[in-house]
Each structure stands twice: as structure tokens, then as C-alpha cells.
Image: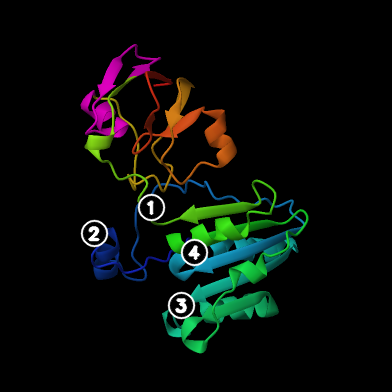
Amino acid sequence: ALEIAVLHEPDGRGGSAWVHANVKAGDRLRIRGPRNHFRLDESLPKAIFIAGGIGITPVSAMARRAKALGMDYELHYSGRSRASMAFVDELAALHGERLHVHATDEGRRNDLRALLATPVPGAQVYACGPLRMLEALEDCCAAWPEGALRVEHFESTLATLDPSKEHAFEVELKDSGLVITVPPDQTLLTALRAANVDVQSDCEEGLCGSCEVRVLAGKVDHRDVVLTRSERDANTKMMACCSRACEGRLVLEL
């Protein structure tokens, strides 16, 4: 059985509102298996989990796994008020003193700079929450080793396409032999679909990683928030919904 948490966003694209209006406990839903770009390293000596708002959804699963493994960990959960924060009671029952609730209306803001002032040898920080929180974490973890901070986003503006600032580029599909031009006002994903090339996608904002395609040649202008810095530097994959070519042609394994 899977337990899901969906924040009600009336002004979203419709999925959240539909779930809240139509799905009831006991309903059976047809789903695709999870795609994980935010994976816990189970060999760590310590993990620091940080969640803001509905970002507790993936972080709570990680913390539960860390507890089951006997790993040293701590869980920091921030929100406007306890009443608005999902799972607080069951998290408290499960994690005890390892859980730190930072509720704004109680005057308990999460001081990220103090929390992360000193790098912990061998530890990793896992965080999910609002964009402003994740940007602050990147600044706070500047002195930590590269890769020590792992984040998952649920919002991003990086994938917004402004045709006046873009250039056209070509993609060569190695398996099919097709060469497709992607105009400035179109994403690679849209261009591929227009050429009847089926590429899976979900969020289409560079958040989920569903539209990942393999890159064989060419330099990618990465605009997703899924790939790590080392994965971007390797230049072997890209998200078709938002990323583009820096210049010239890309060769894809499609």
C-alpha cells in the first residue's frame, strides 16, 4: 500500500484540485511506479532531513527508512502552524526527540544557518520545500563538501520559455536517423512529439525527471532542477521539457 500527500492548490493546473474533489479513502487508482531522483544513501553515518510544508512527503519516507536502518539522523520540519503541517503527530510518535518542529506561529523559525554552520563529516543534508528555503540551504551549505546537499523541488521558474531570448537548435535522433529543428518558441519535448516521437512526461517544468533523454553528443543548456552538478557536467542526459542546446546540434539516443 502507498500513502500519498497532495497539497490542495485551487489555482494549480488541475491535478491537485481533482484529487481533493474526487478521491476518497478506499478508492483504487491506476498509477505508474515511482521515479526516484531523490534517493537516500543508506551507507551514511548521519543524515539531516529538512522539510518545508508539503515537502515533508518525501522527507518523511526517508526519515522512516533511516530509523529502520538504525542510522543517526535528525528531522527538521517547518511550517506556518502545527495545524497546517501534515503528519506532525505521527512523526512525533515515530521519531521522538529526533524530530524538531519549527512552527512560525509559535516563534520557532528554523535557523538554517545555525543548524548547518559546521559541516558534519560524512553526513548529507536532504531537503524538500519551497524554492526560497532551498536557495537559502544552498547558501548555508556553501562550506560543506560538494554533493552533501541533496534537494527535491516542487516549484521552479527555470523552465519558463521566453522565445525572444532563445535560439533554434537541431537534434539528431541516433536510433531513427531523424534530424529535428527545435524553434525558439518550442521545447524539445514539443518538437519531438510533433515528429511523432513518444517521450514520457509529467510535470513539464523540469521538476520530476520523467522526460529524461540520453545525450550522445553536443553541449546541453540544463534548466531542470533534477540533475546534480556532477550529472550536468557529465552531459549524458537532459530533460526534454525544458533544457536546450547551448549551440549547434545535439545527438540523442532516440
Q: Amino acid at mark 4?
A: Met
Mark 1 surroundings within 10 Å by alpha-carbon count, few (fewer than 14), some (14 through 19), many (20 or more): some
Say whether disc 2 or disc 3 marks the residue closer to the N-terminus.
2
Q: Nearer the viewer, mark 1 or mark 2?
A: 1
Q: Which residues are magenta?
A: 171-195
Mark 4 surroundings within 10 Å by alpha-carbon count, few (fewer than 14), some (14 through 19), many (20 or more): some
Q: Amino acid at mark 3?
A: Met
Judging by the rendered image, the residue that carries numbered circle 3 is 85
- The answer to which image quadrant residue 5 occupies is bottom left
Q: Secondary structure at mark 2?
A: loop
Residue in view at x 30 percent, y 14 percent? 178
- Tell me: residue 176, above or below residue 145: above
Residue in view at x 67 percent, y 50 percent? 41
- Tell me: residue 35, above or below residue 110: above
- The answer to which image quadrant residue 154 occupies is bottom left
Q: Amino acid at mark 2?
A: Gly
Q: What separation in Å lies between label 3 and label 1 (alpha carbons)?
A: 22 Å
* Residue 208 vs residue 225, the one in the foreground: 225
Judging by the rendered image, the residue that carries numbered circle 2 is 14
Say whether disc 2 or disc 4 marks the residue closer to the N-terminus.
2
Q: What separation in Å lies between label 2 and label 3 (alpha carbons)?
A: 22 Å
Judging by the rendered image, the residue that carries numbered circle 4 is 133
Q: Nearer the viewer, mark 3 or mark 1?
A: 1
Q: Is residue 157 left or right of residue 39?
A: left
Say whether disc 3 or disc 1 marks the residue closer to the N-terminus.
3
* Residue 54 vs residue 66, the one in the foreground: 54
Say whether disc 3 or disc 4 marks the residue closer to the N-terminus.
3
Give how far across and how far down residue 243 sits, in percent. 38, 35
For the residues labelled 3 and 4, say whether their Cβ atoms are less than 8 Å apart: no
For the residues labelled 3 and 1, say whether their Cβ atoms are less than 8 Å apart: no
Judging by the rendered image, the residue that carries numbered circle 1 is 156
Q: What separation in Å lies between label 1 and label 2 (alpha carbons)?
A: 17 Å
